[in-house]
Image (spheres, rainbow, N blue to C red):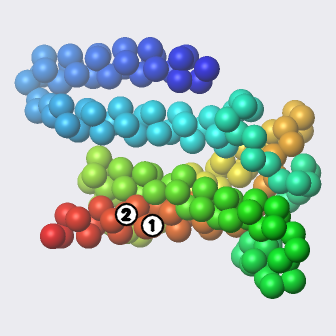
Amino acid sequence: MSLAVTLPVWAVIRLVIIAVRKWRKKPWSAGHEVLLWVLFIYLVFVAAVTVVPIPISTDRSDQPYYINLVPVMKSLQCFLPHQKDRSELRMFCLKNVIGNVALFLPFGGLLPVLFRPFRSGRRVLIAALLFSASIETIQYFERFFGSIRSVDVDDVLLNTIGALIGYIFVAASVRE
């Protein structure tokens, strides 16, 4: 749904920008444009799985009004030996860790390729931290409108780690 609404708007905006660039005889790259489209679709996907209540975003905490403000401890508890009889909880935690890291890999990889100011790992790290914290803040306020999503500082940390890994992959491939 969100892609169906935003895609035509994005397409019109990009066509106007391309036309203005060509009219002003400024350089334009098809490869760069493709990557901008990839970034756009990625951002819509992130919104769909994190803040828009659609069926694709069904992985939620077993405690619907849960807020975790203590970094790392909750995630670590999932993998402690005394939890072995709770394999369902462990699987949820594993999916959460892998999913949050994987969700931001493209963010960390696309920013430095598309935007010169983000060719610094520190800037990518800050952008990822702010973007992820914004998502968690939106999820917190959505709770006042009936959303059952949890708010977790570990998600911010894991997302940021994912973006940093994406940045490292891109930085390593550019240096070779």
Q: Counting other residues with Cα less than 10 Å from the Cα at mark 2, is it few (<14), some (14-19), or many (20 or more)?
A: many
Q: Residue at x 72, y 31 (%)?
A: 55
The picture places residue 151, in percent across and down from the top left corner, at 79, 55
Residue at position x 35%, y 32% from top? 37
Whether residue 48 sits left or right of residue 142 in the image: it is: left
Q: Image quadrant of residue 32? A: top left
Q: Nearer the viewer, residue 80 or 34?
A: 80
- The label on residue 164 is 1
Eyeballing the image, is 70 above or below 112? below
Amino acid type at image mark 1? Leu
Q: Residue 17 — which label?
A: none
Badge 2 marks a residue whose secondary structure is helix
Q: CA distance from mark 2 to mark 1?
A: 5 Å
Callout 2 touching callout 1 (CB < 8 Å): yes
What amino acid type is highlighted by mark number 2?
A: Tyr
Q: Which mark is residue 167?
A: 2
Task: Indicate left or right for 38 with 128 as reference.
Answer: left
